[in-house]
Image (tube, rainbow, N blue to C red):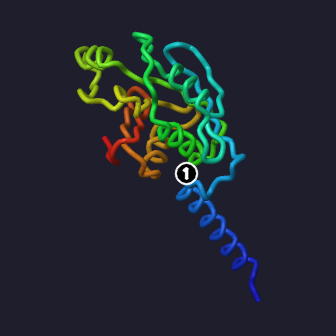
Amino acid sequence: MFSVQSFLRCFASLLFICFAGSQLFATSPAAVSPQDPYRLHFFHTHTGERLDIVYRRGDTYNPAALSELNHYLRDHRTGDVHEYDPKVFDLLHDLTLALGRPDAEIDVVCGYRTPWSNAYLRNHGHGVAEHSLHMQAMAIDIRIPGVPTAELRDAALSLHRGGVGYYAASKFVHVDVGRVRRW
């Protein structure tokens, strides 16, 4: 016979396995139903704009929603728009799930950057990489209100899905879908 403690340990193990499995297969087409909505909530710290959008259902991306996201994440200095890699949105979606906050509003500190904006920031001492993935619309700098920046960084690192930069003094985290690395 199982004791209550044995039952609780088994139940906790089962929950862990289910959660870990859902994270491992979060973007696998076999793991999602055609109806599952992928929703993101944003606040842009430079433009003051908010966006609440379903960009994907199951394994199908919504082209109109992706276009709206590309415009929303435009270079706020120049207004230029670039087509984002949808894997960035999947990363953000999975990051909010990993934090246990699927409905969290994500503060956008920086989305797409033109080469001009990137050079401007580099020349003004902002610690910007010369070949930043922001210029390829493969990166985004974010914070999530109510989530400590170190916790956000740790959750992003746990996904092993690209680069993670931690900017404690400025209270934001850079995430990208390039090679896995950290700074």
Q: Position of residue 19 (x, y in %)?
A: 61, 59
Q: Position of residue 11 (x, y in %)?
A: 70, 71
Disc 1 element: loop
Q: Considering only vertical position in the picture, is 113 above or below 97?
A: above
Depth check, front residue: 140 or 7: 140
Amino acid residing under circle 1: Thr
Taking 120 as reference, is 62 left or right? right
Q: Residue at x 43, y 23 (%)?
A: 82
Q: Which residue is drawn at 69% across and 79% down?
A: 6
Q: Residue furthest top?
A: 78
Depth check, front residue: 10 or 5: 10
Q: Considering only vertical position in the picture, is 36 above or below 77?
A: below
Taking 20 as reference, is 142 left or right? left
How many dots with numbers? 1
Taking 179 as reference, is 15 left or right? right
Q: Position of residue 124 (x, y in %)?
A: 25, 14
Depth check, front residue: 132 or 69: 69
Quarter of the picture holding the C terminus = top left
Q: Position of residue 163 (x, y in %)?
A: 36, 42
Q: Residue at x 48, y 30 (%)?
A: 142
Badge 1 crowding class, 10 Å Cα cut-off, few under 14, some 14 to 19, many 20 or more, is some
* Residue wearing tag 1: 27
Taking 122 as reference, is 104 left or right? right
Q: Residue furthest bottom?
A: 1
Q: In which quarter of the image is residue 165?
A: top left
